[in-house]
Image (cartoon, rainbow, N blue to C red):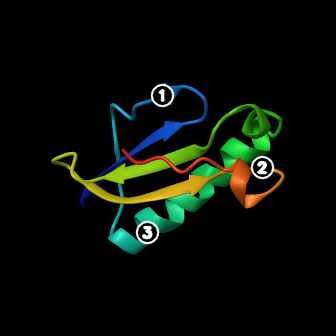
Amino acid sequence: MPIFYFDSEDGGRHPDLEGVELPSLDAAKLEAVKMTGEMLRDQPGQLWRSQAWRVVVSDHEHQTLFVIRVAAGRSAADIVEFHA
């Protein structure tokens, strides 16, 4: 089974050093959504104090496969877009 890495940023950087074996890219997408939901559930107030949250999913060679971004603001102008 392929290994996927789920690095997160929620005001701080949290690299995934171990990775997770999952059967497919679709399974990795579902896992990333679950992880994002857990971050929101565990630290709901932190989102309002950070620029944005990200979950960056990469393969066994640490090549980025996709990114989930979550941001909060009073208006679209309040949300600062950033790129890795």
Name the residue: 34% across, 42% down.
19
Q: Earlier in the sequence, mark 2 or mark 1?
A: 1
Q: Where is residue 4? Give x, y as percent.
A: 32, 52
In the visual, does 73 lie left or right of 20? right
Farthest residue toward the bottom? 26
- Reading the image, the residue beneath label 2 is 73
Q: Split into 4 quadrants, where in the image is the N terminus? A: bottom left
Q: Position of residue 83 (x, y in %)?
A: 41, 48
Q: Disc 2 to disc 1, how far (Cα)? A: 21 Å
Q: What residue type is labelled 1?
A: Arg
**Which label is found at residue 13?**
1
Quarter holding residue 7: top left
Q: Residue furthest top?
A: 12
User: Which kind of residue does numbered mark 2 sit on?
Assistant: Gly
Question: Which type of secondary structure does the marked residue at label 2 adopt?
Answer: loop
Task: Name the front one of labels 3 and 1.
Answer: 1
Q: Earlier in the sequence, mark 3 or mark 2?
A: 3
- In terms of secondary structure, where does tag 1 sit? strand
- The quarter of the image holding the C terminus is top left
Distance Cα–Cα, label 3 vs label 2: 30 Å
Marks 2, 1: nearer the viewer: 2
Residue ID at (78%, 38%): 48
Q: Left of 32 or right of it: where is 3?
A: left
Amino acid carrying mark 3 in the image = Ala
Instruction: Return the residue at label 3.
Output: 27
Q: Which residue is located at x 60 percent, y 47 percent?
A: 80
Circle 3: element type:
helix
First along the sequence among labels 3 and 1: 1
Q: Looking at the image, which residue sits at the far left?
A: 61
Image coordinates for residue 17, horizontal then vertical, percent:
33, 31
